[in-house]
Image: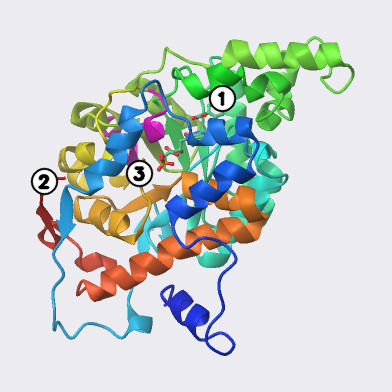
Amino acid sequence: MTYFGNMQNEIYLSGVGGARPELPMTAAGLEELASTTLSPEAFAYIAGSASSERTAAANLAAFERHAIVPRMLRGTAAPDARDLSVEVLGTRLAAPVLTAPVGVLELVHENAELAVGEAADELGIGSVLSTASSTPIEQVGAVSGENWWYQLYWPSDDEVAQSLVRRAEAAGAKAIVLTADTPGMGWRPRDLELGHLPFLQGKGIANYLTDPVFRSRLPGAPEDSAEAMQMAVLTWVSMFGNHTLRPADVTRLREWTDLPIAVKGIVHPDDARAVVDAGAAGVVVSNHGGRQVDGAIAALDALAPVAAAVGDHADVLLDSGIRCGADVLTALALGADAVLYGRPWVYGLGLAGKAGAKHALRILLADFDLTLGLAGFAGVAEIDTSALRAVSG
Ligand SMILES: Cc1cc2nc3c(=O)[nH]c(=O)nc-3n(C[C@H](O)[C@H](O)[C@H](O)COP(=O)(O)O)c2cc1C
Ligand SMILES: O=C(O)C(=O)c1ccccc1
């Protein structure tokens, strides 16, 4: 069993009288430091959400309306025997956490996806690689171990979509996560004020530039000239969004791959039922960190109804607002099998590369491990709604 909580001992017991860690120990601390360290464009892109950002705020506030009611004297497992492991979409993880797919990571670090894939693998958790990665699928797959999934933005050109899926499967991905909530980009004032859209500079499109089918759509090789690269970017713009997708396309996607499929961005129980009926093995309850529909329901508030709708027919994951160990416990108690962790590790990556991303993951895992044990649980399998009491936020 991996004893994530041991990070606490490492800090207090290192040297004489402990050693101060080089990075903040909370997600909020990482964000604050990143706000003064990253370029204004990079920070705005990562921290920003849609319009008034009220859904982004609601994502965090929703967790405060559920209090954990710790149980005492339960004779639970010794700390190093706590079992945090889970199996989701057939993937075994040391803890119920995967890194969320985040595009254009070259804004904060070179070789970013390689660093995150390695860090997650070293911790025994999973990672989800974005279609909008800055490093091609094959290179990331080669260093990310066994427990990584591929997030698909389904281009409006089906043959390009199919090619991306085949490449991911060949590179070793263990599942496909189809993102449904981004047929186009949301209204993002922070980026608009800076006039900053990274893709127009050719960032975050590495998987397209290396795709043989995408390249067959171009008049010339993008490497050949600035004009040819401009054409590639415009071709990307013309095919990125796809407003035509329906649940039946999940069934089509199943014909292209043997991998299990999860649909990300689901908040309505009827949509969850529809994609599971169409063959999805999982749903990711998410509002994209509040970056798409401002005013949308907080992801956590959408969780229990979706979990009830899919029952035992599919696995349920949640993202949008996970910031600490209690958040992971709360999501599991309300029906999630695992969570995706988003912005905080991106800040860690920007602050200190792979070590920073790994630090951000470790503080979440250590906090979750200790919280779980102190609340009276010997493992994640024991967590259910009886762990929580609704309180006014
Ligand atoms: C900078 C940034 C880029 C993102 N890129 C993607 C992406 O390429 N594909 C995707 O499915 N979701 C993407 N997301 C959404 C995340 O996967 C996840 O849903 C979101 O970050 C969760 O919210 P939180 O980070 O506030 O917890 C992105 C989020 C951020 C902040
Ligand atoms: O910025 C995002 O939220 C996002 O999901 C995205 C969309 C297209 C390319 C890269 C990232």
Location of residue 120 by image quarter:
bottom right
Q: Which mark is residue 48?
A: none
Residue at 57%, 55% (x, y): give it. 357
Q: Where are the magenta residues, as a range?
A: 276-292
Q: Earlier in the sequence, mark 2 or mark 1?
A: 1
CA gap, disc 3 and disc 2: 18 Å
Mark 3 crowdedness (10 Å alpha carbons): few <14, some 14-19, many ≥20: many
Q: Which is more foreground, mark 3 or mark 2?
A: 2
Amino acid at the residue labelled 1: Ala
Residue 336 horizontal/vertical position (percent): 27, 50
Residue at 25%, 27% (x, y): give it. 271
Amino acid at the residue labelled 2: Ser
Mark 1 crowdedness (10 Å alpha carbons): few <14, some 14-19, many ≥20: some
Q: Tell which of 359 and 96 is nearer to you.
A: 359
Q: Which is more foreground, mark 2 or mark 1?
A: 2
Residue 264 horizontal/vertical position (percent): 38, 34
Residue 342 sits above or below residue 166 on the image: below
User: Can residue 184 be spotted in the picture?
Assistant: yes
CA gap, disc 2 and disc 1: 45 Å
Q: Which residue is mark 3?
A: 321
Residue 162 horizontal/vertical position (percent): 57, 27
Q: In the image, is 372 to the left or to the right of 361?
A: left
Question: Is 291 contained in the magenta span?
Answer: yes
Residue at 46%, 82% (x, y): give it. 9
Q: In the image, is 81 to the left or to the right of 168?
A: left
Q: Which mark is residue 161?
A: 1
